[in-house]
Image (spheres, rainbow, N blue to C red):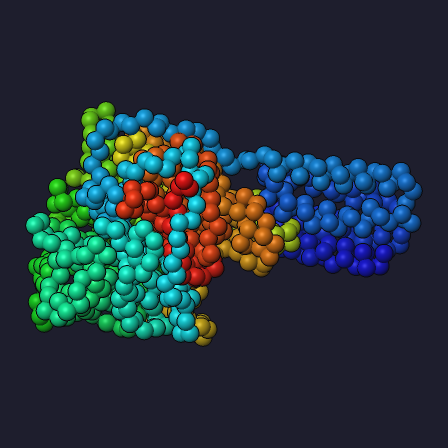
Amino acid sequence: MGLIAILFALIGLVLLGGGLWLISLGGSWYFALAGVVLLLVAAKVRIKRGNAQILYGLFLLGSLIWALWESGYDWWPLASRLGLFLILGIPLLFSFRLMGRSRISRLTGYWWLVALVMLGSLFNDAHQLEGKLNMAPLVQQPALGQSPEADWFSYGRTNFGQRYSPLDQITPANVNRLELAWQYQTGDTKGKGDIGEFTYEATPLKIGNTLYLCTPHNWLVALDADTGERRWVYNAKVGTDSQRQHQTCRGVSYLPPAEGEPENMTESGSKKAETLASMDCDAQLFLPTSDAKLIAVDPATGARCKGFAEDGVLDLLHHMPFPKSGYYYSTSPPVVAKGVVVVAGAVNDNYDINSPSGVIRAYDVKTGALKWNWDAAHPNDTQPIAKEKLYATSSPNSWSVASADEGLGLIYFPMGNRTPDQLGMYRTPEEEKYATSVVALNLETGKPVWVQQFVHHDLWDMDTPAQPSLIDIQTNKGLIPGLVVPTKQGDVYVLNRATGEPIHPITEVPAPQGTIEGDFASPTQPTSALTFNPIPLEEKDMWGASVLDQLYCRIQFRSLRYEGRYTPPSEQGTIVFPGNFGVFNWGGIAVDPERQVMFGMPLYLAFTSTLIPKSTGHLGEVNVGEHGVNANEGAAYAVELKPFLSPLGVPCQQPPWGYIAGADLTQGKVIYQHKNGTIQDLTLLPLPIKMGVPGIGGPVITKGGVVFMAAAVDNYLRAYDLSDGEELWKARLPAGGQATPMTYLNSEGEQMVVIVAGGHGSIGTKLGDSILAFRLKD
């Protein structure tokens, strides 16, 4: 019994010491009181007093009441609070020498009562929002953009970015018959010298009977859409660079042949090699690279289109200020529309206040000649830049995917912030206007037509992360050309895409104040009527694998600054919730233009943001990715960004962290929201417990009423019923599925579903290099 007494005493001391610290910060008294009780139990066990068991039983009962009062009847919060104490009670249950049988039965009764109450909570889902979307079409002939029904011409299928397919062979009734049709491995894997965020995020295009996709090292791969057989590979030969924050490619873009021009493709999809030396391409693929190039490639052969720019290669660092290696590149596909290819790029966050520009540029699709450039720092100066000039330093960039409406002559960019993200004193009024917004530019001239901002004076890295989805919205005033864009902070904005005016109301709400000297926080921030913004955190929302790391998280919660959403960053350290990982990220949402609904994957993970005065001395290792310490060279403060985790590496806030959700776009209302994903690939034991896990990636909606999405940190592709969000089918993937799937018809008229499964370095899923295609079993 000596070891049992020591164990109780050690845990009691930790709880008492930590509990007193928590009380001094204004937190719960429970942990200190629990420490006192455990020390008393340890003393009684040490001297072999039988009432130790009764005291411990009463403690278990009291802890159960406290846990239910704090967290409700919810398994994971109860397990964190009570699990360790139930395990500690097991040795006392078998300590026959210390008590009579009546005392054994009393402790056994208390122990089993607590255990059964806690286990019963497994069958109560406290986080489910049940509902059904209206599945009757509200728009009979919706605008879908320009792509044949059988194909997938752009990242979001068309430049409308809907991620909606009009195919309906696969339905909720038959989706469980899907089976693997083929699998291909690219051979592009993480190597020595690659950065941590090595990620497969590509959504393939399907043109004719060929699939086209890019890999993290910017290989462009062409596959037979029926069999997955490789047709050709173009390797951009991009080297490693430790200064890049990302090593990824989300997709390529396609220019169809001009009307009346042949594609010069044989039945096998290949072109005669002897014609390559002198030809211009009838059709073109555009490949953005992580060494800041845009390459035009022939879809038939994989040869460069020699008439574009310099031998098919356009250097995007032209006229760039501070063109440091690895600081600027495109991770997302450009937009091809109205005779131009429009390119934006990612600028490294928080590495240096003197960084390349976030300029957006349009080039002639055939020659690569610059047609216009739009820089948020000089928004009305869109004529091609003069030879002797440079673009603005560090201006807001657009790293995600844009959309375009050629009928309106507008292109829509989700805008990020000027670096540094957490220090606002370097920004000009023009940059402030366009940062963290969506901006509509004229496709012919690049002139701004309208802008809608989603965060004023953004100090939290709340870049608008996702491609705007263009969908005509049914309203009581008739059909309105709409734009739907989700944000990191959880709001989903529904706007008139012709004017930028809100279709569902936008409200300004008070925001926390108080910043470092020389900066300021906006007194109000916008919020949308359609929102997935979570309830603000409280101490009782803290979590951990046990009561001990939950105590740590509570101490951290009370020690850090937190006054709700938009609490300014600080030297003290600030909790950012939703975190800069985002409620929504680049995977975005999918919209159904017929049924007027959306499907998405909202996530809830808190981060911490700490400003570090450079005067404090050595910062340690800096600039190794978006998270960790970033130097902000030239600024008075570095910044440390990281997830809000316990010492065991689990989130400090209680689960669920990941959901799937459906919303009605005509009402601006969330209809259902369910936990998504299991912990199967998060723990040593492969337990498929549905916890609601994080992820990154996007969904695809089909006319058949089925949604396909992987994204979660367990390695599965899943199919959901669009009407109610119920999971209908899943397939195990060989690696993380952090890419958005797509669907098409093969040459036999069969509907196929394709997912790229290569993993994601920053969220730690298994890396790989696979593309998998599924079709219905005969």
Give the quarter of the figure containing the N terminus: bottom right
Res. 236 image quadrant: bottom left
Q: Determine whether, in the image, residue 772 is placed left or right of residue 539.
A: left
In the rendered view, tell whether residue 763 sits above or below residue 388: above
Q: Residue 499: horizontal and vertical position, in percent?
A: 17, 39
Which of 300 and 340 lies nearest the eye of the viewer? Answer: 300
Q: Residue 89: horizontal and vertical position, in percent?
A: 77, 48
**Residue at horizontal 49%, vertical 41%?**
675
In the rendered view, tell whether residue 126 sits above or below residue 241: above
Q: Determine whether, in the image, residue 521 is placed left or right of residue 714.
A: left
Which of 458 and 202 lies nearest the eye of the viewer? Answer: 202
Which of 234 and 104 lies nearest the eye of the viewer? Answer: 234
| Residue 584 in view in this figure | no
Which of 416 and 603 lies nearest the eye of the viewer? Answer: 603
Q: Determine whether, in the image, residue 51 is placed left or right of residue 479.
A: right
Q: Residue 131: horizontal and vertical position, in percent?
A: 43, 29
Res. 618 image quadrant: bottom left
Report the residue that reaches farthest toward the top: 476
Q: Determine whether, in the image, residue 442 is placed left or right of residue 325.
A: left
Q: Residue 562: horizontal and vertical position, in percent?
A: 46, 50
**Residue at horizontal 42%, vertical 53%?**
737
Res. 777 image quadrant: top left
**Residue at horizontal 20%, vertical 36%?**
143
| Residue 771 in view in this figure | yes
Q: How many marks?
A: 0
In the rendered view, tell whether residue 14 sits above or below residue 116: below
Give the quarter of the figure containing the C terminus: top left
**Residue at horizontal 24%, vertical 37%?**
471
